[in-house]
Amino acid sequence: MTSNDGRLAGKVAIITGAARGQGAAEARLFAAQGAKVVLGDVLEADVKAVAEEIGAAATSLRMDIRKPEDWAEAVAAAEAFGPLNVLVNNAAVVHFASIVDTTVEDYERVVDINQKGTFLGIQAAIAPMKRAGGGSIINVSSIDGLQAKNGIIAYAASKWAIRGMTKVAALELGHHGIRVNSLHPGGIDTVMGNPTGMDNIDDFYRRYPIPRAGRSEEIAQLALFLASDESSYSTGSEFVADGGWGCGEFQKFLPTS
Ligand SMILES: NC(=O)c1ccc[n+]([C@@H]2O[C@H](COP(=O)([O-])OP(=O)(O)OC[C@H]3O[C@@H](n4cnc5c(N)ncnc54)[C@H](O)[C@@H]3O)[C@@H](O)[C@H]2O)c1
């Protein structure tokens, strides 16, 4: 398919954390490209509103990705549309604290949602994707799953784990026609990336090659590529959209163009 329309025609996708931010942007774009989408989130009213805005191509459910029974419900909702082809393991939380100030409860909560929730999603998708004859699983990691920052010990642990789990899953599932890739956003202007809703969020990123925060719609475009058959030869890989954050630091004292 070379046109910009119908790149996901006939596909059914589950997207977690779809009540807002990147998950909601992915839901809108996937549906606009012909997919049927099942939207899960703990924010039941918000995720329902996103599904209603999209219309008949979408359905929503209150879903906690830590619960296997919620995954079973999401899969059932997807298969009511048709065979399950795509899973976006997008839902996550962050916790900002130094190592000494991170309690065991803080640590376990982040790992439970981000890491265990992603594991449960991969596990839940395997049987339906085998029934579908293959599929694409997109595990949303982060730039913090490729490098690190101070103050995010639990989040970094979970996002590096997602990157590793992606490769294990790619190895186990490739011969079933199920591709598994990780997606690594940089700083994105969402509730997570801009919790206080600062108007000048772009200023934080002015040192990077693309000197602004990313938008959810920009990440959705990369997720669309991974969900579609256009990425048919990619599995077990890392796909980055970080505005060049991962390049390194720009040094003012060295020559530039
Ligand atoms: N915003 C950024 O700067 C940034 C950068 C790199 C990676 N990411 C990753 O991108 C993904 C999307 O984040 P976002 O920026 O849209 O954040 P967001 O906080 O706007 O959205 C996250 C969504 O996940 C949902 N969620 C949280 N816990 C859940 C649970 N247990 N079960 C189901 N849903 C749950 C939330 O209710 C929310 O709707 C996340 O995996 C995040 O780690 C974000």
Image (tube, rainbow, N blue to C red):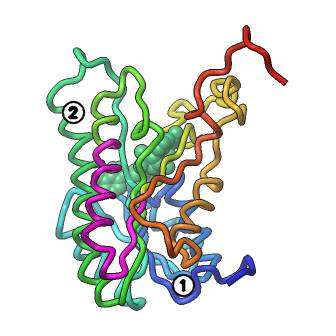
The span shown in magenta is 159-181
The one of 164 and 256 positioned closer to us in this rendering: 256
**The one of 100 and 185 positioned closer to us in this rendering:** 185
Q: Does residue 229 belong to the magenta stretch?
A: no
Task: Classify the position of the N terminus by image quarter.
Answer: bottom right
Q: Looking at the magenta stretch, what is its main secondary structure?
A: helix
Seen in the picture, residue 138 relative to 248 is either above or below; the reply is below
Q: Residue at x 42, y 81 (%)?
A: 85
> In the image, which is nearer the foreground, mark 1 or mark 2?
2
C-alpha span from label 1 to label 2: 39 Å
In the image, 243 versus 202, the foreground residue is 243
Which residue position holds label 1?
56
Give the residue number, with chain letter if any, for mark 2: 107
Outermost residue toward the left in this view: 104
Task: Residue at 53%, 82% (x, y): give it.
Answer: 57
Foreground residue, 241 or 193?
Answer: 241
Q: Residues within 10 Å of mark 2 (few under 14, many from 20)?
A: some
| Residue 179, percent from left and from top | 39, 71
Task: Name the image quarter holding residue 142.
Answer: top left
